[in-house]
Image (cartoon, rainbow, N blue to C red):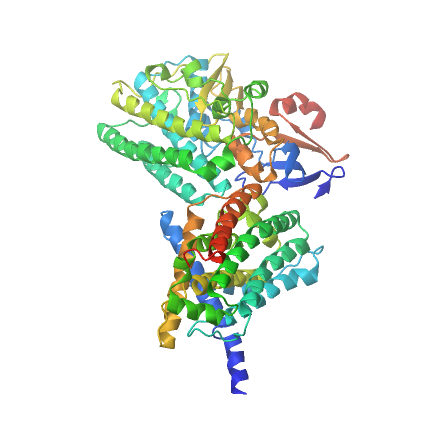
Amino acid sequence: MVAQLLLIIGLLVYPGFVFSILYGGILIWIYRKIRARMQGRRGPPWYQTYADIMKLLSKETIIPRNAWRVGFIGAPIISIVSLATAMLLIPIWSSKPLLGFVGDTIVLLYLLTVPTFAIILAGISSNSPYGIVGASREASLLVWYELPFWFSMATILILTGTLSVEKIVSTQATLGPNIVRAPLAFIAFIIAAQAKLAKRPFDIPHAETEIVAGPYTEYSGVLRGFFEINEALKWLTISSVAATFFLGWPTTGNPVFNALLFMVKVALFAIIFAVIDIVNPRFRIEQAHWPLWEVALIIALIDLVRILAGIGV
Amino acid sequence: MGVRSRKVYSVPVGPYHPALEEMAFYKVYVEGERIVDALIKPGFNHRGIEKLAMKRSYRRNVQLFERVCGICSAAHTTAYCVAVERCLKIDVPKRAQYIRAVQAEANRIHSHLLWFGVAMHVIGFDTLFMHSWAIREDILDVVETLTGNRVNYSVNTIGGVRRDITPEMGKYILEKLNKVEKGTKYLIRAVKEDLTIKARTKEVGVLTKEEARKYCDVGPTARASGIEEDVRRADPHINYEDFDFEVCVEDTCDVYARIMVRLRETLESIKIVRQAIKNLPEGPLMAELTVPRPNEDIGRTEAPRGELIYYIRSNYTNVPERVKLRTPTFVNLPSTKPMLIGDKLADAPQIIVSIDPCLSCNDRVIIIDVRTGKKKTMLLDEIIRRRGKIW
């Protein structure tokens, strides 16, 4: 009974829904603040993301008449639920995640892919030209970034010889962080994750000067607010995956210290993604092929082959 | 999405679109992502300025024409004043001409930096956009020192200028110009070194030299297509023959060339301002005004966007009988069509922006026949000719 109660609290409060939104909001604020400072601006106050979300949630939602209602309403909800669930599979205060089981890595990576399909669904069901173009761009980008993403993950799984997140973290505690043991896989992961986050130079699906807001063009009010929440969760989950799989190393015995350390690491990866976003213009859709397949995929494969051959492990 | 044939779709760009700060409607026909045709439709911002100008005195029209365009306001008043002075045979003192040159070039620097920021924003490089606008802030300080205003300068007037440049002001301006020059050189280096900017702009929106001649392009758009033409050289209306500057020409004919032409021109303009302030001649600021006689003449300037022409016809009154202006965007806008065809949809906004469209200067009247619902865009003199029939 207590276990179920803890699980429900975990799902809704910590590390699930409430914590994710709050800390994801802070990550978005970090991104916006760094962006503003590097561009010679002041930047928003720390509560800006929450204020945006609150305002959107209190506004009227308009659903276009020719949109497919089920997909239009369902898309943001599917995305939020899958990302909040993914947070339960990530260890925060110890090396053991709340919902850990053997093979949970595969589930985690699948849950991270769901939001992309939700965005494609949103774009297609909104039935506007910008939404459809945005969805088709998101779909082509998906093909390009998923492969390096999974190959870099496969490198880590082979390196640690396990499919459970808990084992991956505890292996790093003894053998050193994976960022040192598999550096090329880490670079491939960062490039692919940048595309997964849809940040520059890969913000092609919602390039505002070309297709307005892409799949989000027709969204307003509460549903648009859900997408804002979704954005916060995306920043948090993807940075958390980076922190868990590549920098799971300094762990203390104290759960509070562990949790704080984890948050610092997540913020560190968020800063890396933010800086890449700031110093780059946007690629055209067919140009995104080059960094994702000809750079990220190849270096991920090099590391994979190196580790399979047992060189320098 | 309207279907044109089986495979060709039309995508609307504008009239309200994040990439276009002003209103124009582009119907872009695409086959997949490739553009096969484009339909350009301006005409959302008619203000009736030419008609209004024919009811106001020469002097009051200066303030009116300043408001044709918020960005190249100095170019408009300069061209108008030059036209009136030629028409009324007024000989403007040299000091006034030099002050006009200083403000016209400051105007060009701010316009080019503003455009560069927008062009970077369109390809998604917001960081460089913010940096170029921060540099522009310095030249706006110069403009404010010169004129007291940031947008509408109100310095030109018929027969001269209304404000002087004191030696202290000159010193301050030169100091600020050093900062602007440093910033512009940094921008040029950033464009030359960044691979992604090159990937997005090289061989995009190509307008060959022949096509540029055919469409009669003017200004930086023509110079980026390898045509060496500049009103400051061809018709040195405000003593441009005194200054040493280079007409910047690029021959790659693409969006990258248009970026480089404008950035290099910014440096040339800084050179001109320095020379003008250094060699500022002594003398009065205003000429003796003459009494209007029936006559006609044109005034031309090299506005930041290209050649700007004002036509004036005078009679015995202090109100011009006819004023006609031809803005550079009016000439350059049709040439976006050959630039667009064959390129990708993702490049459409940046190609449209690359001619630096200033549509509010450009628009003409649309006549809608209520009975048949037919729409027709026409020029003002056409309406005057047909006034009896329609109204």
Left or right of residue A236: residue B15: right
Left or right of residue B186: residue A238: right
- The reply to whether residue A52 is in sight is no
Q: Position of residue B349 (x, y in %)?
A: 56, 38
Q: Give whichever of A194, A190 is nearer the camera.
A: A190
User: The C terminus of chain A is located in which quarter?
Assistant: bottom left
Quarter of the image for residue B266 reads top left
User: The N terminus of chain A is located in which quarter?
Assistant: bottom right
Q: Position of residue B109 (x, y in %)?
A: 38, 31
Q: Give whichever of A293, B192 is nearer the camera.
A: A293
Quarter of the image for residue A256 reads bottom left
Q: Where is residue B22 in the image (x, y as percent from the top left)?
A: 54, 38
Q: Where is residue B24 in the image (x, y as percent from the top left)?
A: 59, 36
- Please state the total of marks drawn on the protein image: 0
Q: Give whichever of B318, A173 is nearer the camera.
A: A173
Left or right of residue B182: residue B300: right
Quarter of the image for residue B33 reads top right
Residue projecting furthest to the bottom:
A1
Q: Give whichever of A4, A20 is nearer the camera.
A: A4
- The reply to whether residue B312 is in sight is yes
Residue B364 sits above or below residue A153 on the image: above
